[in-house]
Amino acid sequence: MFDGANTRRGFPPGAGPSRSPFERGRVVATERRTSQEDAWRLEKAGYVLEVTPAGRRCWREHGTGQLLSGDHAAELLRLEEVRTLEEAGWEQVEDEADTYWRRPDTGRLYPRGAAYDVVKGAQER
């Protein structure tokens, strides 16, 4: 990557001090805070929040005991919810900006979380 500032300092392009972690051969992962709704759904699904000695907030997966980032745990939960809805016969409907799920017996549309709660409630009865 051409860096005009380094060239002006006497470094050829690609040499000299690098500010990008990708150019130094290591990648730094940033962690987005888990939303309150995601945290609530993760706890309801059996994930346990743990804070590491370094202060990083991770979720322990209920089945494997693996320690996962909030984003990774939320994505696994989302995939599990989608699989459950599809197995129960719900149809995914995409609107301009949002995704809803059509209830098979009534045709009503629900957001994913609410649809999953309806399916789980019906399975528990």
Image: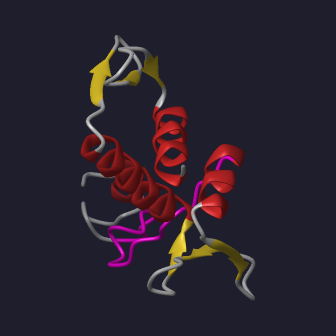
Residue 35 percent location from the top left of the image: 66, 47
- State whether residue 42 is above or below residue 107: below
Left or right, residue 15 beside residue 64: left
Q: Is residue 28 magenta?
A: yes
Residue 119 percent location from the top left of the image: 45, 42
Identified at 50% across, 56% down, the residue is: 74
- The extreme front residue here reads 125
Left or right, residue 58 beside residue 12: right
Q: Main secondary structure of the magenta part?
A: loop
Residue 79 percent location from the top left of the image: 35, 53
Left or right, residue 68 beside residue 4: right
Q: Which residues are magenta?
A: 16-35
- State whether residue 103 is above or below residue 19: above
Identified at 29% across, 70% down, the residue is: 15
- State whether residue 99 is above or below residue 118: above
Identified at 47% across, 41% down, the residue is: 116
Q: Nearer the viewer, residue 34 or 40?
A: 40
